Image (cartoon, rainbow, N blue to C red):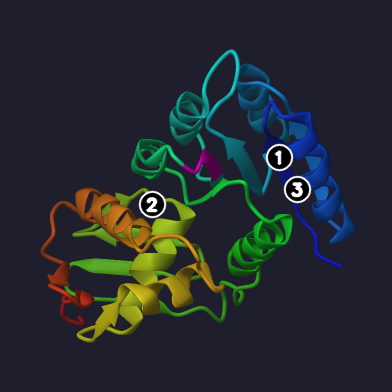
Amino acid sequence: MASGRILVVDDEQSIVDVVTAYLRQEGYEVHTALDGPSGLKAARVLKPDLVVLDVMLPGMDGIEVLTRLRRESDVYVILLTARSEETDKIVGLSVGADDYLTKPFSPRELVARVKAALRRLHGGVSSVEAPTLTFRHVRIDTGSRQVWADADPVDLTATEFDLLKALAEYRGMVLSRERLLQLVWGYDYYGEERVVDVHIGHIRQKLGGDGFIVTVRGVGYRFVDEEA
């Protein structure tokens, strides 16, 4: 059975009930909240491993909850958006969502994404065994999941770290968006590939520019820092 603490924040009780039932059946510890303020408070108190967060919430919408949460936590967040609200997806990714699902969605697909995310976050090798990827300007400690750019620490979310690590491990090679989705998100991804572009933008900003990750137009991305 799987293990992990999950917080589900949605104001539709029927969705909460179904998602909770599916996740608990897999062995997860599940907590719920039905509005934005309660969801933010629960996230701060419970410190879950993963949050399933609806955009349309009473009291405080999901984008605001996510914005506030990102100031103090890098918890993995799957955003639930209405199918017609394309802006919600982009804004949600821009303020720190790791992934999104559009309503209506399959509970089985949500469970698959949760499993993949938690397996990636918790299933790595120990810090003793994990290598440090050292380049001229960037250093990536895969055990402690810490990154430095020119000796300055860089604060990345879990997904940003995994994306940078994947690119660095294939230094000099061009990785397509599809390949990066396979390496980082770890399941058959049915969303849009722009999720990669948004996270790449975040990494570039935090590393201090786009010099380390080069866009290969029409193909994907390449990590270019030289090995130390």
Q: How far apart are marks 2 and 3 (CA)?
A: 21 Å
- Residue drawn where x is 75% and y is 48% of the image: 5
Q: In which quarter of the image is residue 40?
A: top right
Q: Secondary structure under badge 1?
A: strand
Amino acid type at circle 3 is Arg
Residue 182 within the magenta-colored segment of the rendering: no
Left or right: 121, with 131 as reference point: right
Magenta-colored span:
79-83
Please state which of residues 189 and 196 is positioned toward the viewer in this rendering: 189
- Under circle 2, the secondary element is loop
Residue designated by label 3: 5
Image quarter (top left, top right, bottom left or bottom right) of the N terminus: bottom right
**Identity, as a three-letter code, of the amino acid under mark 2:** Leu
The residue under the point 72% across, 61% down is 108
Q: Circle 1: is it few (<14), some (14-19), or many (20+) Cα within 10 Å?
A: many
Measured in 3D between alpha carbons, the distance from the residue under mark 2 to the one under mark 1, in whole angstroms, is 22 Å
Q: Mark 1 highlights which residue?
A: 7
Q: Which residue is farthest front?
A: 84
Residue placed under numbered mark 2 in the picture: 156
Q: Quadrant of residue 211?
A: bottom left
Q: Which of marks 2 and 3 is in front?
A: 3
Instruction: Using the image, determine if residue 12 lies above or below residue 25.
Output: above
The answer to the question of whether label 2 and label 1 lie on touching residues, with beta carbons closer than 8 A, is no
- Residue 46 location (% of width, % of height): 73, 34
Q: Position of residue 178 (x, y in %)?
A: 37, 76
Q: Mark 2 or mark 1, which is nearer to you?
A: 1
